[in-house]
Amino acid sequence: ADFENFFQGMPPPHFEANPDYQQQQQRSRNSQQQQQPPTFGLDDWLRSMMSGGGGGTQQQHRRPRRPLKEVTRTLSCTLADLYEGKTKTVTLTIGNNNNGLGRQQKRRQEQYTIHVKPGWKAGTKIKFPQRGRYVPPITFVVEEAPHATLERRDADLIYRHKVVGSSSDGDVDDTTSGNPRDQKRRGRRKKNPTKEPPQRQSPPKPVRLSIALPDGTVWQRTIPADRVPRIVKAGQSLTVPDLGMPMKGTLERGNLVIEFY
């Protein structure tokens, strides 16, 4: 009773919170939350699978590109293309069932732009790398198409001119192109069945040469009559400098060589 009477009439006790203690408790709760592993729900898993992650990063699970077998194709070029240079666009159809990926591949068209440089030779290779997962690397090999009147030998252009008869009897072909149709105009010498003595030899005539070059220009020269016996002979040749093919990496050109046969 004395104990109860002692507290009668006294206000109830009041306790104040210690601010340092509250801050310490808040820091403890934050630390526990950081240590807990993050939750990974069904939505997160589906989102990861659809983005290609499979539960991890996309780069870790991306399938590496598989190298495809190289394909070789021929690039046909005329002598004019190799004489002046030209830009060619080649369209190839890519796609078949045997693509090495275990599934059918749709056919597609791929374009390749090739800058043919002056002086390229037959056998020159132009390589293109693989495009994506389905288009293999392509190598184009230059193939030189034959020319109507000129033949290429390294950097020289060869023109063959036919000599009818021999210069000693004055029967020299003075046509411009060496075309068989032009040569037929001369006709053939008739045999002398009576074996009469040969007639007096006529003097040689000038020989006119007209040669169309690959770029469309025409080189023309006339060999004087007094020089025909020494120049226009079967087995002889006439060289014209700097009218041949360009030399790769330089400004020089080969020669135009006229061979008489």
Image (cartoon, rainbow, N blue to C red):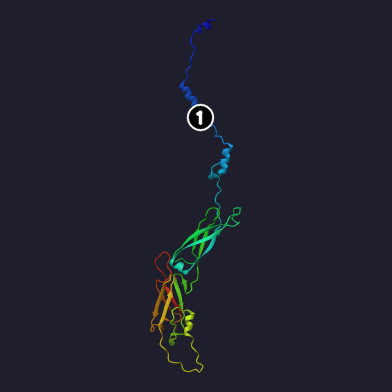
Q: Nearer the viewer, residue 39 or 155?
A: 39
Q: Quadrant of the N terminus?
A: top right
Going by the numbered disc 1, the residue's amino acid type is Ser
Q: For mark 1, what is the residue?
A: 31
Is residue 10 positioned above or below 202 on the image?
above
Report whether 95 appears left or right of 210. right
Query: Which x, y percent locates residue 58?
Result: 54, 44
Report whether 39 appears left or right of 236. right
Is residue 47 positioned above or below 244 on the image?
above
Query: Which x, y percent locates residue 118?
Result: 44, 65
Query: Which x, y percent locates residue 252?
Result: 40, 68
Query: Which x, y percent locates residue 99?
Result: 59, 55
Q: Residue furthest top?
A: 2
Is residue 16 positioned above or below 171 on the image?
above
Which secondary structure lies at badge 1?
A: helix
Tag 1: Cα neighbours inside 10 Å, few (<14), some, or many (≥20)? few
Q: Nearer the viewer, residue 202 or 109?
A: 109
Q: What is the number of callouts on the image? A: 1
